[in-house]
């Protein structure tokens, strides 16, 4: 199977892509033309939704409600989580709260980029940040290292996570 | 009175909060704040100087090269290592492609374009679009402005054109950068060139390209259509300039000389008048204030720079930063006593004043105002302008070994990012970083009471059924990059 086929299968599920303490490096990596139909699949084709702050039509509470009311989605997290949750906020939520809430419902969780995997470079910063698996307990977190993580590996990980991914 | 909270704002980089008040059909208040903190300057402190470009490069994945480049230029000053013309050529070519051109296409069409698409424009605006014939239909093929609006939305033809173009521009830049974001080919005084044919390949692509012309003239239609709709905050601008001349040598004492020869020269403009084109003077005039932000005051450590110029307490070389609260992680940046806009429009304005007429792809740019559509048009015009620049660059022979010059222990790298003036101030201690301060263009534009808030307050709500839209168009027209803006400091 090639990259575009895997992507097409992955995009049969909704994707909620949350940026915590990120630089959007992985969002930029994934924002590439190339696969046939990727442009349609990626953005707002119904019923599939790729919701990320990076590419979303709506703003504010309306956007957050859409995110919180989503079902049947893969949760993708980009960026690290700070020790003090108030150092990263998305609207009324801290990044950590929002991610934990979404993780309960997510059918797969993928941490993309070194920051999301283990805090990356921000481990040493004043924020003493850590990765997603230290936040979400009791659910498997699939991880893609790299700074930035490659778009191909991100899609591969989403595909693997959706297909059960073995026992991990 | 209506209060509206637009947090989180989408289609920008990162986490930005915006609250506005609306009264009698006008925005009467606006508060824009940064919602995320990362702590880069603490990270850099105490590290080996040689690590700075790699670490600073991780500030932002959207402006994927600027922080590496600016950090490298700061190190070149600090260590007295200068690039040869061949190195400068390769850096210029790659930097023009990505960051500048790729970013500007993304922001104009992937981010901003949606706000001007038929899914988003108010009914009246769309009706007016249906009645407005296009001026350049021979170039882009659209009959009416409403036809353009129809194609700007996600997945539509203009959106797809832009998505493809920005992908290609990034891939071309990667021939030189070897990785993007976060180039790995650059080092102080040099660059690793893996593909000797890179520049020919880039020129070949651009010769065949038609998309840039098309997107330029699509944006030109919008420029006419939205003329006078948005608030003009006046010609107050700052740019550090863009793309080095081959005479670049990173020496602080000679900064004025080499920076002056940048393809787009530096400049500071107040009320339409060029106050100075001297980059060193512009940089000495940067002030960081704490009011309205989460940061605490600090003590002055240095009275003078290494040439004996006075340093203000609030100058970045003096800044040591502490967090005191959590409300706003964007610092307040002032240029001595005013808050100029930075970005594409500032660069074009200064170029026009200092170097004369600006034409690209058959379009002659003249300044009109500092408003939503003008900032947006300047963004796409810059892509066209740099396309012409790249088509005209010529190969430079020679090696890429660093040239030796005069080292300093205090240094600054300053070079425009797509979003505007970006600078890193470094104080070295042996081979270690004693202090590292970063002031990004988003810090300037999104400062408390800065250009963005000024642009929203007093703006008429163009359609009362969409009271959010104008404020969002304003924010996106400044191309915020919150990752860059909140790179900072020790909590």
Image (cartoon, coloured by chain):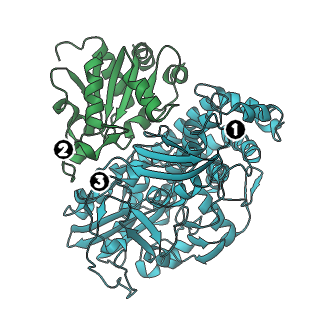
Chain colours: A green, B cyan
The answer to whether residue B359 shows anywhere in this view is yes
Marker disc for residue B210: 1
Marker disc for residue A83: 2
Q: CA distance from mark 1 to mark 2?
A: 49 Å
Can you say which quadrant of the picture contains the N terminus of chain A?
top left
| Callout 1 secondary element | loop
Q: Position of residue B191 (x, y in %)?
A: 40, 56
Q: Position of residue A121 (x, y in %)?
A: 24, 47
Nearest to viewer (mark 3 / mark 2)? 2
Left or right of B180 on screen, residue A97: left
Given the image, what chain letter belongs to the residue carrying mark 1?
B
Marker disc for residue B320: none
Q: Nearer the viewer, residue B186 or B343?
A: B343
Is circle 1 on the same chain as circle 2?
A: no
| Callout 3 secondary element | helix
Disc 3 vs disc 1: Cβ atoms closer than 8 Å? no
Graded by Cα atoms within 10 Å as few (under 14), some (14 to 19) or many (20 or more), the crowding at tag 2 reads some
Q: Position of residue B135 (x, y in %)?
A: 83, 41
């Amino acid at each position: 199977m090639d990259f575009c086929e895997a992507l097409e299968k992955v995009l049969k599920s909704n994707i909620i892509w949350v940026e915590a303490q990120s630089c959007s490096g992985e969002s930029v990596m994934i924002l590439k033309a190339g696969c046939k139909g990727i442009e349609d699949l990626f953005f707002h084709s119904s019923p599939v939704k790729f919701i990320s702050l990076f590419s979303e039509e709506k703003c504010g509470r309306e956007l957050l409600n859409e995110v919180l009311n989503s079902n049947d989605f893969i949760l993708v997290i980009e960026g690290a989580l700070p020790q003090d949750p108030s150092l990263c906020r998305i609207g009324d939520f801290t990044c950590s709260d929002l991610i934990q809430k979404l993780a309960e419902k997510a059918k797969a969780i993928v941490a993309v980029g070194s920051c999301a995997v283990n805090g990356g470079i921000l481990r040493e910063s004043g924020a003493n940040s850590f990765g997603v698996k230290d936040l979400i307990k009791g659910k498997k977190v699939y991880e893609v290292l790299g700074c930035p993580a490659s778009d191909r590996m991100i899609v591969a990980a989403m595909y693997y996570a959706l297909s059960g991914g073995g026992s991990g | 009175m209506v209060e509206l909270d637009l947090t989180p704002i989408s289609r920008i980089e990162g986490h930005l909060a915006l609250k506005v008040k609306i009264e009698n059909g006008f925005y009467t208040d606006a508060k824009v704040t940064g919602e995320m903190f990362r702590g880069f300057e603490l990270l850099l402190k105490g590290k080996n100087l040689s690590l700075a470009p790699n670490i600073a490069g991780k500030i932002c994945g959207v402006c994927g090269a600027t922080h590496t480049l600016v950090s490298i230029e700061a190190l070149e000053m600090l260590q007295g290592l200068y690039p040869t013309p061949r190195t400068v050529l390769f850096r210029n070519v790659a930097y023009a492609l990505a960051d500048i051109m790729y970013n500007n296409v993304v922001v104009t069409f992937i981010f901003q374009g949606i706000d001007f698409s038929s899914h988003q424009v108010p009914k009246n605006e769309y009706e007016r679009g249906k009645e407005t014939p296009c001026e350049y239909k021979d170039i882009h093929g659209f009959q009416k402005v409403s036809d353009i609006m129809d194609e700007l939305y996600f997945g539509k033809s203009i959106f797809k054109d832009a998505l493809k173009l920005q992908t290609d521009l990034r891939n071309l830049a990667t021939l030189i950068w070897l990785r993007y974001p976060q180039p790995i080919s650059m080092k102080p005084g040099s660059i690793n060139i893996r593909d000797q044919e890179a520049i020919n390949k880039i020129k070949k692509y651009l010769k065949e390209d038609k998309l840039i012309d098309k997107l330029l003239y699509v944006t030109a239609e919008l420029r006419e259509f939205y003329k006078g709709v948005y608030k003009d905050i006046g010609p107050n601008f700052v740019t550090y300039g863009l793309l080095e001349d081959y005479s670049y040598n990173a020496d602080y004492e000679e900064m004025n000389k080499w920076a002056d020869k940048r393809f787009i020269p530096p400049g500071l403009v107040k009320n339409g008048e060029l106050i100075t084109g001297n980059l060193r003077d512009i940089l000495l005039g940067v002030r960081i204030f704490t009011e309205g932000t989460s940061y605490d005051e600090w003590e002055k450590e240095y009275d003078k720079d290494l040439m004996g110029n006075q340093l203000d307490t609030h100058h970045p070389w003096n800044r040591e930063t502490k967090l005191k609260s959590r409300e706003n992680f964007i610092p307040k940046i002032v240029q001595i006593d005013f808050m100029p806009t930075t970005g594409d429009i500032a660069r074009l304005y200064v170029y026009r004043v200092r170097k004369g007429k600006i034409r690209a792809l058959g379009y002659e740019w003249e300044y009109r105002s500092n408003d939503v559509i003008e900032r947006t048009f300047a963004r796409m015009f810059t892509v066209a302008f740099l396309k012409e620049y790249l088509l005209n660059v010529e190969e430079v022979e020679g090696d890429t070994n660093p040239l030796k010059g005069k080292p300093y222990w205090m240094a600054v790298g300053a070079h425009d990012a797509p979003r505007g003036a970006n600078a890193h101030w470094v104080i070295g201690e042996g081979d270690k970083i004693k202090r590292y301060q970063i002031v990004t263009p988003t810090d300037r534009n999104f400062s408390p009471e800065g250009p963005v808030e000024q642009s929203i307050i007093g703006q008429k709500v163009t359609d009362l059924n969409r009271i959010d839209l104008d404020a969002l168009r304003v924010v996106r027209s400044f191309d915020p990059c919150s990752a860059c803006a909140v790179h900072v400091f020790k909590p």
